[in-house]
Image (cartoon, rainbow, N blue to C red):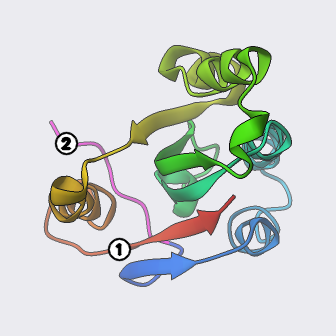
Amino acid sequence: MAKADFPALLVPGMHQLTMPDLHALAVAPFPHDQRRADLYRKLSVWTNAVKAVGVSGKMWIDGSFLTEKVHPGDIDCVLWSPYWVDPAGATPQAQAQVSKLFDQATAEALYNLDFYLETPALDQIFHREAYWRGILGFCHDRVTAKGFAEITL
């Protein structure tokens, strides 16, 4: 049985947002939904930790967080081809921190992220992006198109 769909906060397509834009879209309009504020706070902690260790990339955000659902469960997140801003910063300690941040179970347990890491080979980028656009760009009914966010770290 398919999950229930809630009205989407974005029109169909990919929308480039900043973290403040995401807050204005998915948190501020729901002042009594503490769960949304908590999810956003945890996402902010995670993104700041990724940036602090010296890693950048693009992430696609979706899930019930980008719908009108009250008390969304988590934030769906796909991080695309992260890279070291300064390769000299890839110390063993930094690499260990990145491994922890990018671990799917840890991301779910600590940050409430349904996290996926994508590092496709050049000849697979189109196919992997098409796959995720199909997952993130449609409601659970697999017919109704909806939007998702892209945020640059």
Horizontal and vertical percent for residue 36?
Answer: 73, 48
Spatial CA distance of label 2 from label 1 is 16 Å
Q: Looking at the magenta stretch, what is its main secondary structure?
A: loop
Residue 18, placed above or below residue 11: above
| Furthest-front residue in this view | 88
**Foreground residue, 149 or 50?**
50
- The 10 Å Cα crowd at callout 1, few under 14, some 14 to 19, many 20 or more, is many
Residue 148 lies in what quarter of the image? Answer: bottom left
User: Number of numbered discs present?
Assistant: 2
Q: Which residue is mark 1?
A: 146
- The 10 Å Cα crowd at callout 2, few under 14, some 14 to 19, many 20 or more, is few
Type of residue at label 2? Answer: Ala
Type of residue at label 1? Answer: Lys
Residue 96, placed above or below residue 21: above
Horizontal and vertical percent for residue 24?
Answer: 78, 74
Residue depicted at x 57% and y 27%: 102
Residue 151 lies in what quarter of the image? Answer: bottom right
Q: Which quadrant, please, contains the N terminus?
A: top left
Work out whether mark 2 precedes mark 1 in sequence or the reverse, and give the earlier one.
2
Mark number displayed over residue 2: 2
Magenta residue span? 1-8
**Foreground residue, 35 or 95?**
95
Instruction: Give the SS element for disc 2.
Output: loop
Horizontal and vertical percent for residue 11?
Answer: 43, 84
Residue depicted at x 64% and y 43%: 71
